[in-house]
Image (cartoon, grey):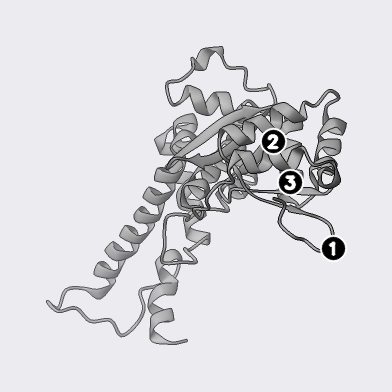
Amino acid sequence: MNSQTAFATPLLAPELPCPSGLTTWNNSDPATRYAVYRNNVVVSLIDALADTYPVVQQLVGEEFFRAMAKVFALVNPPRSTVMACYGQDFADFVTSFPPAASVPYLADMARLEMARVLAYHAADVPHLPNEALRSALTDPDQLMHLQLALHPSVQVLASPFATVSLWAAHQGVACLSSVDPDVPQTALVFRHALEVNTLEVDSAVGKFICALQARQSLMVAARQANEQAAGFDLGAALALLLHWQLITTITTDKEDHEPAH
C-alpha cells in the first residue's frame, strides 16, 4: 500500500486507526489532527449530498438525512475530483436503507433530484430548426424511417408515486397538503435556455421519448407509446418536443443513414 492510499483509506473507515508515521508542524498529536481532518471530509460529503438532494432532506428532516448520508458516504467515496454529481447511486442506497422504508417515495425523489443535476451539467447541443422536422414529416418516403435524436439533458422518470407534484410542492409551486403521494406520475426533466425544467407528462409520452432515446424510429416509438396507453397523441408529443426545442437531429434508419432534409 502506497503512502497516499495508507493516508486516504482510513478517512472513510472510522474503525481504522490513524495512519502511522504522521507528523505535525507544531508537535501536536497526529491522531487528534487526523481525526479532525477525517471528520471534515465526511461532513463535506454529507454537505454535498444535502446540496444535491434538498427535497429528500426536507421529506425526512435534516437530522435523519445527515445520518443516512453519513452511512452512504462512508461506503461510497467520491470516484472523481468533480463533486457536482457525487451521489449518483444515492437513490439505490435509499431503496435498500431500512430506516427509510416508511417514506416509500424517497428513492424516486432522489432519482428526480439527481436527474435535475445531470440535466444541468449535460452537454450543450443546438436544437433542430422546427422547419426541418415539419419538412421531414411531410415526406411520406421518409416518414416510416425517421429517427429523432433528443437533447442530452432529456431524462424520463416513471414512478408509482407523485414525485413531480411532491417536488413542485417543495418549490412553493403547489400545496403539499393537496398532493396524494400514491398517484403515479411520469417526470420529464430537461434543460432549456440554461434552466432545468421538470414537467409531468403522460406515461405514454414518457414511453415515446424513451423509445426515441433508444434509437427507435418515429413510428415504432409511437406504436410502443400507443401500447402503453391507447389513444396516444403523436402530434401533441411532437409539439411538446418542438416547443421546448428538444430535438437535435433527424436521421433515417435506412442503410444509407443520410440526414433528412
| Residue picked out by circle 2 | 158
The amino acid type, in three-letter code, at marker 1 is Glu
Left or right of 33: which side holds 184?
Answer: right
Give the labeled residue for mark 1. Answer: 255
Q: Which residue is under mark 3? A: 212
Q: Nearer the viewer, mark 3 or mark 2?
A: 3
x, y percentage for residue 107?
60, 40
The residue that appears at 62% across and 39% down in the rendered structure is 131
> How far is mark 1 from mark 2, CA to CA?
33 Å
Q: Earlier in the sequence, mark 3 or mark 2?
A: 2
Separation of residues labelled 1 and 3 (CA atoms): 18 Å
Disc 1 to disc 3: CB gap under 8 Å: no
Give amino acid for label 3: Leu
Which label lies toward us, 1 or 3? Answer: 1
Compared to 101, does 151 lie above or below?
below
Which amino acid, by three-letter code, is at mark 2?
A: Ala
Secondary structure, mark 2, is strand
Vertical placement of 186 versus 253: above or below?
above
Whether residue 77 is visible to the viewer of this picture, yes or no, is: yes
On the image, the x and y values in percent for residue 78 come to 47, 63
